[in-house]
Image (cartoon, rainbow, N blue to C red):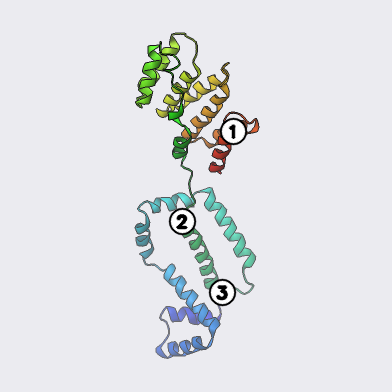
Amino acid sequence: MSKAQEHITAYLNGEMTTEEMLDFEREVSKDPKLAASLRLEKDMQIAFGDDDWFLDEVETYDPGLIEKYTSFFTSKEAKDLEHKITGVIAKNRPKQEKPKLWYAVAAACIVGMMLTYFLWPQEQVDYQELYADVIAINSLPSLISRNTNDPLLVKGQTAFEAKDYKKAVDFFSGYQETGQKELFYGEVYLGIAYLELDKFDRAIETFRNLETSESLDSGLAKWYRALAYLKKEDTKELKKILNEIISVKGTNYQKAQDLLKQLD
């Protein structure tokens, strides 16, 4: 440690006599470089002192922030950040180090990045909000106007529109069990009802079966299966299906492109 650094440490720690303090302050007033070092060291002592002001301050931002810190420190992102900081320090470390001052600067960099991460976090994808935006339940064609003779379909759509999805599933499943000709949109209603009940596997199975049907609208079934993975928040499968739709310019491929961009 250099003499200048020793004097700074002694001055800030109150280890100087009155005469030594006055001499040091006169020296600081004449030496801009020493003055800058003193200011930085003082700031570091304030930031990394033993007082508990920092935790008190954190509580004013968000009661759950401490838990978020803990989660961050164990994440892959934290490990990547650690490697980057270590690399920068190793590359730029001066030949004649001033250890305390140097590590204080490194610590300040880390704290700055951490505050940026926690106080101004990157925007997170809200899967449920995206699902609500693209599912377009109100635009589904009416089953009643297509086939008013079957009471199960009428009751199924009525329950669906009333958001009584459990009853809707019962009625549409009942229609399936009658062995009558499969109605594409009847199956779509059933699949979406499963989704609204968070029965993702049943919904995915329903839409997958529709993809192999002979209906002219079968290409639309893959889009609905993608939305099932969206509501399930299964990013891997969702992106896989969206890319499949885009690659062949399938049904709703433009919507698939837009949705994929919002996930990146």
Check the picture and name the quadrant holding the C terminus.
top right
- Residue labelled with disc 1: 253
- Residue labelled with disc 3: 98
Q: Quadrant of residue 119?
A: bottom left
Q: Which of the labelled discs sits on residue 120, or is there none? A: 2
For the residues labelled 3 and 1, the Cα–Cα distance comes to: 60 Å
Under mark 1, the amino acid is Tyr
Give the mark nearest the N terminus, 1 or 2: 2
- The vertical placement of 81 against 209, above or below, is below
Give the mark nearest the N terminus, 3 or 1: 3
Of discs 1 and 2, which sits in the foreground?
A: 1
- The vertical placement of 124 against 9, above or below, is above
Residue 3 visible in the current orientation? no
Under mark 2, the amino acid is Trp
Give the mark nearest the N terminus, 2 or 3: 3
Q: Residue at x 53, y 69 (%)?
A: 105
Q: Residue at x 49, y 15 (%)?
A: 183
Check the picture and name the quadrant holding the N terminus.
bottom right
Under mark 3, the amino acid is Lys
Q: Are marks 2 and 3 in contact (CB under 8 Å)?
A: no
Q: Of helix, strand and loop, which one carries label 1?
A: helix
Q: Quadrant of residue 259?
A: top right
Of discs 2 and 3, which sits in the foreground?
A: 2
Q: Residue furthest top?
A: 179
Q: Of helix, strand and loop, which one carries label 2?
A: loop
Query: Mark 2: few, some, or many residues within 10 Å (few <14, many ≥20)?
Result: few
Q: Residue at x 51, y 60 (%)?
A: 113
Q: Position of residue 220 (x, y in %)?
A: 55, 25
